[in-house]
Amino acid sequence: MADPQRRWCFADQLGPHFLDAKDQPVLLIEARAVLRRRRFHRQKAHLVLSALRHRAAELGDQALFVKADTYGEALARVKGPLTVCGPTSRAADDFVRKLDGVTVLPSRGFVTSRDHFEGWAAERGDRPLLMESFYRGARRLTGALMEGDGDGGGGPAGGRWNLDKENREPPPADDELPLPTPYRPREDDIDEEVRADLDAAERRGELSFVGRDGPRRFPATRAEALRALRDFVRHRLATFGPYEDAMLADDPVMSHSMLSAAMNLGLLDPMECVRAAESAWRKGEVPLRSAEGYIRQLIGWREYMWHTYWHFGPSYTRRNALKARRRLPEWFAELDADAVQANCLSTVLRSVRDRGWTHHIPRLMVLGNYGLQRGWHPAALGDWFHRCFVDGYDWVMATNVIGMSQYADGGLITTKPYAAGGSYINRMSDFCHDCVYRPTSRSGDDACPYTAGYWWFLARNEQRLTGNWRLAPQLRNLRRIDDLDEIVARERERDRP
């Protein structure tokens, strides 16, 4: 049998499941222009280059590793036909489909195919797309956490599909989760080389970054990713369920897996993470609500975000249903956590600055919530998340930020805006304990920017949100706030919280 054609693997396609044979020839390209197009977080640039170079070193002579300024320049040096798994961004997908001698295969690294999703969406007819419905279908398709007959038959484990209502506990009373330190990879000579190259590029003025450099916290190899997965399942999955929505100032990780970056680099297949969590539950090592909560993030939300990115088309990122047009302030764009007094926002910005990562609730209910209240342009905020998070990619941030976080799609992804005042943050975190603002105050010098900002958001968008039944009680309450004009005027002029 002839050797399979050389497989071109992008830097987010680095796992073995992107190859058809163990010895298949591989093309890897490190294109410097990618880092010039956007001002990425320094640790994100380091992680991607480290993962790419580690994969080249692992494959040895099996891989042709080309460093060039652009993909086009690199491909000019490559002889013979290529195959490539469908890229994860529209720009890259458009690029590869225009190339001669390159066969584009279906995308990998996800549980369900795009044809499967489009078929499911067509069956919905005029009914809105609902992640919960898609998630249940994915459970049936994969058999994950199912009981009864094989092949996804029977019913959900425990008799219920979704245990989310059990997984909304605030942090423990002593504001501490007694868990071991999360897995941390050890840097090596490749990391040292990457850091030196990035330092030199910055000195020459060729590249510019946001955020701080620091020891690599996320897996850059398949072996590291598997160790991180085992560590999560053994030490953190059991408490993931109850505390997945909670936040602690001194514990940015809590019970979260920190595996999204490895998964989005292609080092882990999502189904092996699903099976690992399911196996731990079936062995009695973790409660069902933790296993279900984690699995729902993978074959529910992650999968749904991937498919809706393609389903809604390229115009989706230009949606702006709430007409939010304010520019991101410099302190936010530059991750200047010290310029902010609000303890929650300062703490979360510091985590982004120092790690390029926070878990999903600070992203949604601290960062995204603030941008939504302030009327920041959704596309600009989506780009910020893409650049500043180690796990950020176009497909991830489009529907997560444009749709879920900023409600710029007018309700295609969610049934209401994720706007909340300081009371929510106070209930789900310890951020408010030492803050200069009071979470219950909406006016005065100690007014919480989130509480006052919530009412400014509703007042500014009252007409646009009138038809949303889930917000009807809050919109009625607007008329009962006698100092609303004062709140709106104050928040409109607020420079920073």
Image (tube, grey):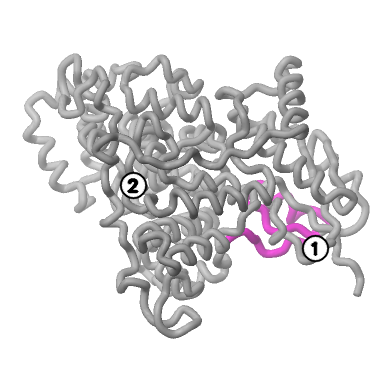
**Residue 85 magenta:** yes
Please tell me in which quadrant of the rendered image residue 211 appears.
Answer: top right
Quadrant in which the N terminus is drawn: bottom right
Amino acid type at circle 1 is Lys
Secondary structure at badge 1 equals loop
In percent of the image, x 57 and y 69: which residue is there?
115
Q: Nearer the viewer, residue 97 or 392?
A: 392
Residue lying at the far bottom of the rendered structure = 149
Q: Do the residues labelled 2 and 1 touch (CB within 8 Å)?
A: no
Q: What stretch is highlighted in magenta?
A: 83-110
| Horizontal relation, residue 27 to residue 168: left or right | right
Reading the image, the residue beneath label 2 is 243
**Residue 144 magenta:** no
| Horizontal relation, residue 371 to residue 61: left or right | left
Q: Where is residue 444 shown, x and y percent of the image?
A: 16, 17
Amino acid type at circle 2 is Tyr
Q: Where is residue 181 shown, x and y percent of the image?
A: 49, 38
Q: Nearer the viewer, residue 212 or 6?
A: 212
In percent of the image, x 62 and y 33: which residue is there?
216
Q: Residue 73 carries which label?
A: none
Measure the alpha-carbon separation of dots 2 and 1: 40 Å
Q: Nearer the viewer, residue 429 or 496?
A: 429
Q: Nearer the viewer, residue 277 or 479?
A: 277
| Horizontal relation, residue 47 to residue 446: left or right | right
Please tell me in which quadrant of the rendered image residue 20 appears.
Answer: bottom right
Residue 90 sits above or below residue 433 on the image: below
In percent of the image, x 36 and y 26: which residue is there?
345
Secondary structure at badge 2 equals helix
Q: Which mark is residue 22?
A: 1
